[in-house]
């Protein structure tokens, strides 16, 4: 047993649980990943011709870059913005190529390691001011989030019930929080998941914020009271538990699950390309080393299998599915895998329009909205399309802040404004569906 664990176990008996949420020795982000990102850059490019796009694809492939947006080289095309994280040794080669080819670019992050170190020092300062309770304005490790869930299960048993729907590839429990006023009568439900992609930390932060707001405003806010009285919310704060843990301990920009492949050394599957809906078609990769690898077969990942099994079992009363991602500032609905209009388009589109307007009313932040295929890009095997195809009529995917200035390193000072505005959008969608969409 480590010193920290011994200290925790001895103090657990007499320290308030809220204090134990905060790590007694706050290590920052896993010793800042052993300086692995020193000199790395994030560069934004927009090819102005198809020739430039094809040249960039080849260069990205040769340099084995980490694409931040879009998620696959497949989507690099004329006029499409690409944000690329490139290691120190590759950035010199890429910049020389861009200058020679006269391709316009902008350096979004000059030194990734320094940006991480700055975020870590700010986090330590913020935590010192929040020793009285759980701080919703910082990012939390998987252990902290799971402790928080169990604490709420004990202290708010009238509105909250925590349960596990299975185990991850590495054996971690897949916890879901059921939120709502208990009722003997039939109640419809909303499913919310965050953190399908490990590096998108603002997702799990929002899931926690949603629960906090629900509990704090249940008595004072008639809209929240109506939501919790008439609906259940199934909330999964961290879908990809293994990947999220790995993004805290080893690689801040890890995206996939952590399953092993028998034929390749590369690990993990894109949990948002692993669903049985046009599986491994356009926008997904069959190569295990790619970030959009669809897996050896649909639902190969135990995390995806567990959620799909739960949703299938409860699909008669789950009426809405909301999934939270980052980054792009978009509110998306089906289809992802094809350019086509869903049968209940008018209701879904109206809900999206009102949600985006509600979101903008707080800080003026603009979100684009529309079908995922035309608003973002075509991708197959997504959870949103699967949920829609399996009888959940109102399915949405949020791409939260920002549009690339910070990318996956959205500072903690932006957690509160991001979650505050997103909260309005989610309440708007929920009430819209209760009122106007039978």
Image: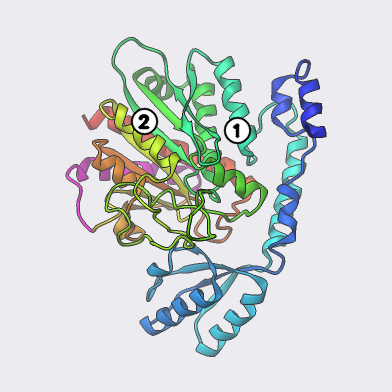
Q: Is residue 141 visible?
A: yes
Image x and y of residue 184, in percent: 33, 9
- Magenta span of residues: 339-363
Image x and y of residue 70, in percent: 44, 63
Left or right: residue 142 versus residue 226 is: right
Name the quadrant of the C terminus: top left
Residue beneath label 1, please? 145
User: Eyeballing the image, is 245 above or below 280?
Assistant: above
User: Eyeballing the image, is 74 above or below 429?
Assistant: below
Per the picture, the main secondary structure of the magenta-coloured stretch is helix
Q: Residue at x 63, y 41 (%)?
A: 139
Q: Nearer the viewer, residue 214 or 246?
A: 246
Residue beneath label 2, please? 310
Quadrant hosting residue 63? bottom right
Image x and y of residue 67, in percent: 50, 65
- Asked whether residue 361 is drawn in magenta, I would say yes
């Amino acid at each position: 047993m480590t010193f920290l664990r011994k200290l925790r176990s001895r103090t657990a008996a007499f320290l308030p649980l809220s204090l134990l949420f905060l790590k007694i020795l706050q290590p920052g982000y896993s010793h800042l990943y052993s300086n692995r990102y020193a000199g790395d850059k994030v560069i934004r490019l927009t090819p102005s011709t198809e020739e430039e796009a094809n040249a960039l694809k080849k260069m990205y492939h040769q340099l084995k870059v980490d694409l931040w947006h879009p998620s696959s080289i497949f989507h690099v095309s004329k006029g499409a913005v690409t944000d690329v994280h490139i290691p120190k040794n590759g950035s010199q080669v890429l910049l020389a190529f861009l200058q020679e080819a006269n391709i316009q670019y902008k350096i979004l992050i000059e030194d990734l390691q320094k940006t991480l170190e700055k975020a870590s020092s700010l986090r330590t300062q913020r935590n010192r001011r929040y020793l009285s309770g759980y701080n919703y304005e910082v990012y939390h490790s998987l252990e902290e989030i799971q402790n928080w869930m169990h604490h709420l299960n004990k202290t708010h048993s009238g509105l909250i019930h925590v349960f596990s729907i299975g185990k991850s590839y590495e054996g971690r429990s897949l916890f879901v929080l059921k939120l709502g006023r208990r009722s003997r009568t039939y109640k419809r439900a909303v499913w919310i998941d965050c953190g399908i992609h490990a590096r998108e930390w603002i997702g799990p932060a929002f899931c926690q914020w949603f629960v906090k707001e629900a509990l704090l405003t249940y008595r004072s806010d008639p809209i929240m009271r109506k939501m919790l009285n008439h609906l259940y919310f199934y909330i999964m704060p961290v879908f990809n538990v293994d990947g999220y843990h790995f993004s805290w301990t080893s690689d801040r920009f890890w995206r996939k699950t952590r399953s092993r492949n028998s034929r390749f050394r590369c690990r993990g599957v894109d949990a948002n390309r692993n669903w049985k809906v046009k599986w491994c078609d356009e926008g997904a990769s069959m190569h295990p080393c790619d970030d959009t690898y669809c897996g050896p077969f649909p639902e190969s990942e135990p995390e995806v299998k567990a959620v799909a099994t739960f949703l299938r079992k409860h699909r008669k009363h789950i009426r809405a599915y909301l999934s939270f991602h980052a980054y792009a500032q978009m509110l998306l609905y089906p289809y992802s895998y094809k350019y086509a209009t869903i049968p209940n388009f008018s209701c879904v589109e109206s809900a999206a329009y009102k949600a985006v307007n509600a979101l903008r009313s707080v800080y003026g932040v603009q979100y684009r909205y529309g079908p995922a295929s035309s608003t973002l890009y075509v991708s197959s095997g997504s959870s949103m399309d699967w949920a829609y195809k399996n009888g959940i009529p109102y399915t949405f995917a949020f791409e939260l802040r920002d549009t690339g200035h910070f990318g996956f390193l959205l500072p903690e000072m932006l957690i509160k404004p991001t979650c505050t505005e997103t909260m309005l959008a989610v309440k708007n969608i929920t009430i819209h569906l209760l009122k106007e969409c039978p």
